[in-house]
Amino acid sequence: MYLDSDSHKPSGGNETMSRATGWERLRQRLRAELGEDVFSSWFARMELERMNDHLAVVSVPTRFLKSWIETHYVDRLMGLVASELGASGGFVVEVRTVNRDQPRAAVVPVPPVQTATARPQPALAPQPTVLADHLGSPLDRRLSFASFVVGRSNALAFASAERIAALVGSPSPYNPLYLHAGVGLGKTHLVQAVAQEAIRLGKKVAYFTADKFMYGFVSALKAQTALTFKEQLRGIDLLVIDDAQFIQGRQVQLEFGHTINALIDAGKQVVVAADRLPSELESLDERVRSRLAGGLVVEIGTLDEELRLKILTARLNALGAVHPSFQISAEVATYVAHAIATNGRDLDGAANRLLAHSTLSGTALTVETAEIAIRDLVRLREPRRVRIEDIQKLVAARYNVSRADILSERRTAAVVKPRQIAMYLSKSLTLRSLPEIGRRFGGRDHTTVLHAVRKIEKALGDDRTLSDEVELLKRMLMD
Ligand code: ADP
Ligand code: MG
């Protein structure tokens, strides 16, 4: 077995070999268990990037695939990476950039899409200053309150984060603070800002990305220093956990639960960021979820165009401070903020591409040349751009009802079923949050959406016809 050969510490070459065969076995088992169709839809382009004894890092070409795999195949993959690769701490899915293997023409490195393990450097300043006077994962000095641009969609999150940072050390009415939002909307920026402000105020801080927390705990267990790890954690004033949706594994999630309970009960501040609501953290125990839901839960909404323009302008100014010849007209900036409708991370990427193109061409960018500069960014994002409206239209047509019926209050079976399917598809195929989906379905509550999603998920397991139908709808929407 692979696990045995690994514990004999084979030489690098053998290890690479057994990893490769382990990976091949994993793929074959997936294919056998899921069938050729499902396998080729979701896993054909998945690659093993790197791994250690605890964690396997796999990559896929699009964020959509990443989020799909994370929502639908976590358990299956966890089992397989443990049995075939010997990675006991599970796995992390990264998105690889399109041009990864080609030499880069850019003057500035184009940042890879951010993942749980590798954080690309945002373009606030040329070099990050990493802070190390705390426990856990590194902090990036540029991610401060001062550099955070406030707009309608993040004002509440910002205000809560600032307030809590100032209160660390004294009893806080907002404990835990739970921030949730889709990818690239500023969660990491805000929670790192809280951590850094607390450090500045002389507090003891632990900042962990979920994978670091899992890794830290699992390796402490192996080295039989788990107690020290826990004691260290309990001696702090503020615990920040980023990307909590990745916390998984029975023992780790139990420990996570104990840790936050102990801290909150002792009046220490806990701040958690995740890409979904506490109730949707399926890999966590129900009690942990409700503890997380019991504090202050704040969503960061999608960035409107005005806010995007402000964030982009701040980035461009930071780049301009380092590259004085780099000038972008207001017209070009406005165009880019309009075209990159996704999130702050893509705005970072766009700013870097604008810099690369203008440096390479040696001339000022026009809207036309800017469009070329950011074209691949826009295209890269397209696979996940299924629109809720299109889902509603397609599902309505398929079930012979109108879109208005789907949005209406009517509760007849003929309308309820397509409505639930459309909600399920919206959750599966877009990165919209449950509250957002609820709003788009005639102003329903997020719990209604969650109920629909769970109901359809369950039905899919029991009802072959329904699952074929839903699979077909998915394909139609994604083509
Ligand atoms: P998340 O953790 O939610 O995926 P990040 O915090 O990593 O997102 O944000 C992605 C990028 O966008 C970062 O470079 C971050 O600094 C930037 N960003 C997001 N929102 C804002 C904002 N309101 N002001 C300034 N920068 C922002
Ligand atoms: Mg983040």
Image (tube, rainbow, N blue to C red):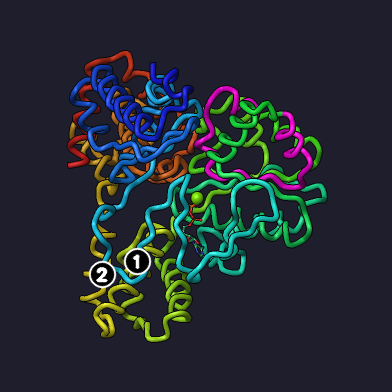
Residue occupied by mark 2:
373
Instruction: Residue at 37% x, 39% y: name it.
Output: 67
Q: Is residue 451 left or right of residue 419?
A: right
Q: Is residue 38 visible?
A: yes
Q: Amino acid at mark 2?
A: Ala
The amino acid type found where label 1 is placed reads Ala
The mark nearer the N terminus, 2 or 1, is 1
Q: Position of residue 88 (x, y in %)?
A: 49, 25
Contact, mark 2 vs mark 1 (Cβ under 8 Å): yes
Q: Which residue is mark 1?
A: 350
- The quarter of the rendered structure image containing the C terminus is top left
Q: Magenta segment: does it hold 246?
A: yes
Vertical comparison of 413 with 477: above or below: above
- In the image, residue 113 sits, relative to residue 152, either above or below, namely above
Which x, y percent locates residue 300? Answer: 52, 53
Q: Which residues are magenta?
A: 227-255
Residue at image position (24%, 22%) is 31
Q: 370 and 209: which one is in front? A: 209
Q: Position of residue 3 (x, y in %)?
A: 43, 20
